Amino acid sequence: MPVCVSDSVKVGCFALQTCLNYVLSLGIWPGGGSSDVQWCFSQVKGAIDDDVAEADIISTVEFNHTGELLATGDKGGRVVIFQQEPESKNQPQCRGEYNVYSTFQSHEPEFDYLKSLEIEEKINKIRWLPQKNAAQFLLSTNDKTIKLWKISERDKRPEGYNLKEEDGRYRDPNTVTTLRVPIFRPMDLMVEASPRRVFANAHTYHINSIAVNSDYETYLSADDLRINLWHLEITDRSFNIVDIKPANMEELTEVITAAEFHPNQCNTFVYSSSKGTIRMCDMRASALCDKHAKMFEEPEDPNNRSFFSEIISSISDVKFSHSGRYMMTRDYLSVKIWDLNMETRPVETYQVHEYLRSKLCSLYENDCIFDKFECCWNGNDSVVMTGSYNNFFRMFDRGYRQDVTLEASRENSKPRSVLKPRKVSTGGKRKKDEISVDSLDFNKKILHTAWHPLDNIIAVATTNNLYIFQEKLN
Amino acid sequence: MLGRGVKRKWSCLEEAEVVSEARQLVLGLCLEKLQRYQAGVELSLRRSVLLINTLRQIQEEMRSDGVGSCDVHPDSCLLRDDFREDVTVTCPGCSEGESPPELPSQEANGSDQQKPPAAVSDAVNAMGYLGDLALDDIFEDIDTSMYETSDLPSAWASGSLPQSHSTAGSLQSCLMDLNELDHIMEILVVETHLVGPGLQNGFSL
């Protein structure tokens, strides 16, 4: 029992602090508690050797809506889906591992005879549809054609046919003396992928984005100059909703780089451009959404102007927050968070690798300046993540205003080993464990990352390997 | 940023020189990248547009710099320190004051270094012509959407010109071919005007 006021205050404070520590350690603090999150290596998928087969280069990574399934697409046109094992009772602290669930060839290389050009089979994007029945559906696209795939499980098969043997051969009718009805018996799980719809011949230019609408009936596909709206059931027609192709191609100065639907408002979508602008459109306003409802653009900083200003302002990815209140854009050097109610400038800007600003000429020479990095939100929109070079990836905690650089490499691949934060030294003196800018490997780029919608599990794609990291649980 | 007083003249010249070097290098890289052609694979429109915009920007700056004497462009000063840093990174054999290294032998770059603004604008204009009016006027009633290229006007990516130049790939030879094609176009246009309303039913010369 406190004997005086000051004592009671002390006790109260101590109690409060203890409570806070407890809540933070649970990781359920609304801010995400990123300052407490430590990331551990969980799994790595893909070939071990350094000799990368071109077809194995991962080109897209996407969790489904529950996070149970993780899909990757590669340059060879294949889709590989991993499924999370249910948590084992033996290790309740460890979240289930992801194992191969289904592999299929989504797209094949094609030849455009009219232009004498190859159409690459590389999968540019995969988008999952929310699950409505036992089967799973996803959309996958290459440069020209979008396909709807149905992935279904088969774990029973009919046995005991009346007229057929077990191997399918027909029985000699003379031997059939009784009538029997086949019954379903369990079999080894088989996962089948079948193309249900093919949405073709609607894009003259290269498709860079597909996005499913919140009505789950329509979706959009965007190429360099146009955006089309499709109904999932209808493959022979699409509506053109954005067209920025000038009458005279010589006047072309800007292309569409990414597009996304608002997560809640089925009439709203955004598209980003190579000039660093984002336009938000309302489909209720008119059939052709050439006039934007809002345009988001940050005025250029005159101190940073160079020959490469426009190239580095080009937006490579745009993602709405799960809440629908914000959107995030990725340009070459930074990640910006925009409040949808404010068009004049972003509310937050995070520098991904500012040390590259003085190297832009070299990066232009070796073409790295054209690399398109993606970005993603965590489940509660408190942390954002994006990739960089040297197999580094970066996380920015919006609440705690902290950021961390981590590395996806075979060296840090001991099971459940905690990832150590990395640092790039920019000044003259390089501290121990830091890496200098000139030692960075620009061939090792992390362009594609994904965050589990509900848990702290992330999938990070290096050139041909997929790394899965999990939050360290005590 | 510029020094005041007597020293101004020298630093002005110095900066102008460095800026001009930077421009030549980036200009050369732009042209090299635009000419790079991978047989059978479509070029990225985004990349091409960004390259052309950069090219145009340099052209603009050169033009405006040519007008003003010691009017140092705002970004030149800012560029200088950055560029010097980059010069050592990108051109190991390059040091202050030396001209940029020879880019992989392309006659285009040689001539461009002498008179960049004219060559660039000529190239862009000449190349744009093909995708422009002539074809549209003559073939108005024919639906050419099937034949739309997803590239820029075909000549912007010079490699997509007629096969005879798949090996050459240099700016000069492309321009010569374009001049021939221009000539042919002119003949067609003249003939169309002679034929007049008969065009709807086909040529009848």
Image (tube, coloured by chain):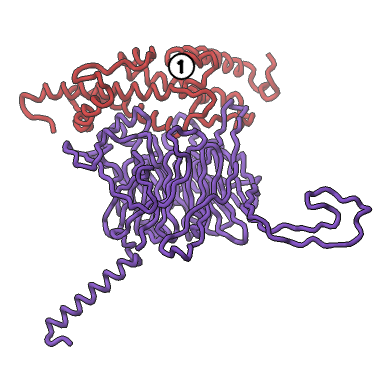
Chain colours: A purple, B red
Q: Amino acid at mark 1?
A: Gly
Which residue is situated farthest in the right direction here? A174
Query: Which residue bears the numbered disc 1?
Result: B169
**What residue sits 39% from the left and 59% below the top?**
A325
Residue A270 horizontal side relative to residue A192, left or right: left
**For this rendering, which residue is in front, A395 or B46?**
A395
Rendered view: A198 above or below B46: below
Q: Quadrant of residue B82?
A: top left
Rendered view: A51 above or below A44: above
**What residue sits 45% from the left and 58% below the top?**
A453
Quarter holding the N terminus of chain A is bottom left
**What residue sits 55% from the left and 44% below the top?**
A79
**For this rendering, which residue is in front, A251 or B42?**
B42
- Local crowd size for mark 1, using a 10 Å CA cut-off: few (<14), some (14–19), many (≥20): many
Q: Residue B142: x percent and y percent? A: 64, 29
On the question of residue A266 being in view, the answer is no
Rendered view: B97 above or below A120: above
Residue A429 horizontal side relative to residue A404, left or right: left
- Secondary element type, mark 1: loop
- Number of marks in the image? 1
Rendered view: A341 above or below B138: below
Q: Residue A278: x percent and y percent? A: 40, 47
Residue A130 horizontal side relative to residue A358, left or right: right
Q: Residue B12: x percent and y percent? A: 15, 24
Q: Residue A144: x percent and y percent? A: 57, 38
Instruction: Give the chain letter at badge 1.
Output: B
Quarter holding the C terminus of chain A is bottom left
Which residue is situated farthest in the left direction here? B6
**For this rendering, which residue is in front, A178 or B47?**
A178
Q: Quadrant of residue A198?
A: top right
